[in-house]
Amino acid sequence: MGFSVQGFFYQVFIDPLINGLRRSVASMILPDEKVIDVACGTGALSLAMARHAGHVTGIDLSEEMISTARRTAQKRQSSNVTFVLLDATDLSCYSDNSFDVAVSTLAMHQFDPETGVKVLMEMRRISKRIIIADYNCPLRSGPAAFLARSIERAARGDHYRNFRKYMARDGLNRLAAEAGLTITSRVERGEGVFLIAGLALMVADGN
């Protein structure tokens, strides 16, 4: 578990900006629940949830992020959290309803639409309930929204292109619908910039 420049950057500069959002998500986890944190990054949310969850599994496709998360967990002696290098579009290693909750924070806007739908469908299959925290759509105007857009623009490349697609396609609203899910609860944070949403399986209208 060597030092990761990318992981260090996120821990020092990005994680502190969204600590409040992560605390809000962590507060929604019930005691002793089995949780999977999809696209867990540095593991900050996973470790926060592990304080009262039964067990947390954090997955990410970045070796650097998983290395950073494992190193932090080891330092904190967190025994009920596991970090796994895994592609969230294929969670076939987990059976249906393996987890009580599947969560993901500020990851959906980073995926291209097709990938985002696949990830949500896998989360739907392996968990009993889903919590997604990402950008609200449309963003509320103000300093917080300006900062968010500036950070995304600075990321450039595919990251920024996917962010723009996410916002142009009505954000989580459309992505959830395409994955056969409906948003059952909404909580806004960060001056309306962020949305924490509870998702459930869409029920077909019998009429």
Image (tube, rainbow, N blue to C red):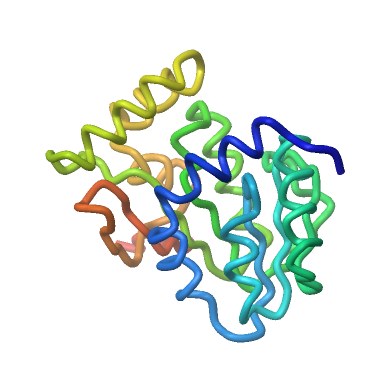
Identify whether 37 is placed above or below 48. Answer: above
Which of the two residues, 94 or 64, is positioned nearer the viewer here? 64
Tell me which corner region of the image, top left, top right, bottom left or bottom right, holds residue 167: top left
Considering every residue shown, the one lying at the far bottom of the view is 31
Position of the C terminus, as image quadrant, is bottom left
Name the residue rendered at 80%, 50% in the picture: 84
Q: Is residue 170 left or right of residue 108?
A: left
Which of the two residues, 65 or 185, is positioned nearer the viewer here? 65
Considering every residue shown, the one lying at the far top of the view is 157
Name the residue rendered at 73%, 67% in the picture: 76
Which of the two residues, 156 or 16, is positioned nearer the viewer here? 16
Residue 81 position in % (x across, y down)? 75, 66
Identify whether 175 is placed above or below 149. Answer: below
Residue 164 position in % (x across, y down)? 34, 23
Q: Is residue 124 left or right of residue 65?
A: left
Which of the two residues, 163 or 154, is positioned nearer the viewer here? 154
Identify whether 183 is placed above or below 170. Answer: below
Name the residue rendered at 28%, 58% in the picture: 189
Residue 159 position in % (x across, y down)? 49, 23
